[in-house]
């Protein structure tokens, strides 16, 4: 087994319980949120003016989803928590585009 695969196996199977393990998770949530907002804007809207709002909605939804899932299941693995946060971000961004954004226009 290579050192990289051993490190990856340990990181996937290690629950996030220590405060020092929370900071990489927060950085991951921020990165995922920015990426979801940017990609969501490209796929759902061609409006350049909507870009900051979409990125902000994706960012806030991903962070909120990650925090809520962490509160519900504090021993969840890193990738599971990041995946749930990403799914929440995508769902909230789609709901925002379908219901909230047309009401504001």
Image: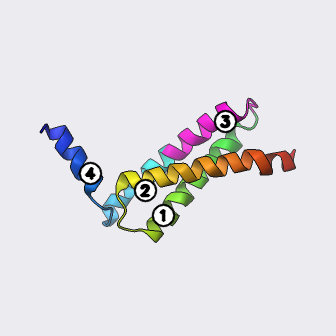
State the residue in front, 94 or 18: 94
Neighbours of disc 1 within 10 Å: few (<14), some (14-19), many (20+): some
Residue on which the image places disc 1: 69
| Residue at x-position 57% and y-position 41% | 36
| Residue at x-position 22% and y-position 51% | 10
Mark 2 and mark 3: span between their CA atoms? 24 Å
The N terminus, quarter of image: top left
Residue on which the image places disc 2: 81
| Residue at x-position 35% and y-position 66% | 75
Q: Please report the bounds of the magenta region as a residue range.
A: 32-48
- Element under label 3? helix
Asked if the residues shown at circle 1 and circle 2 are in contact, with their CB atoms under 8 angstroms apart, the answer is yes
Q: Is residue 36 magenta?
A: yes
Asked if the residues shown at circle 4 and circle 2 are in contact, with their CB atoms under 8 angstroms apart, the answer is no
Q: Is residue 41 magenta?
A: yes
Answer with left or right where residue 56 lies relative to residue 9.
Answer: right
Q: Please tell me the numbered disc located at residue 41.
A: 3
- Element under label 1? helix
| Residue at x-position 64% and y-position 47% | 56
Does the image show residue 62? yes
SS assignment for the magenta stretch, majority: helix
Mark 4 and mark 2: span between their CA atoms? 13 Å
């Amino acid at each position: 087994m290579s050192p990289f695969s051993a490190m990856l196996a340990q990181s996937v199977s290690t629950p996030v319980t220590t405060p020092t393990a929370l900071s990489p998770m927060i950085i991951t949530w921020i990165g995922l949120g920015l990426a979801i907002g940017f990609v969501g804007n490209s796929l759902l809207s061609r409006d350049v003016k909507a870009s900051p709002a979409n990125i902000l909605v994706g960012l806030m939804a991903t962070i909120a989803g990650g925090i809520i899932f962490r509160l519900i299941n504090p021993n969840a693995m890193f990738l599971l928590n990041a995946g749930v946060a990403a799914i929440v971000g995508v769902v909230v961004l789609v709901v925002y585009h379908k219901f909230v954004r047309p009401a504001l226009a």
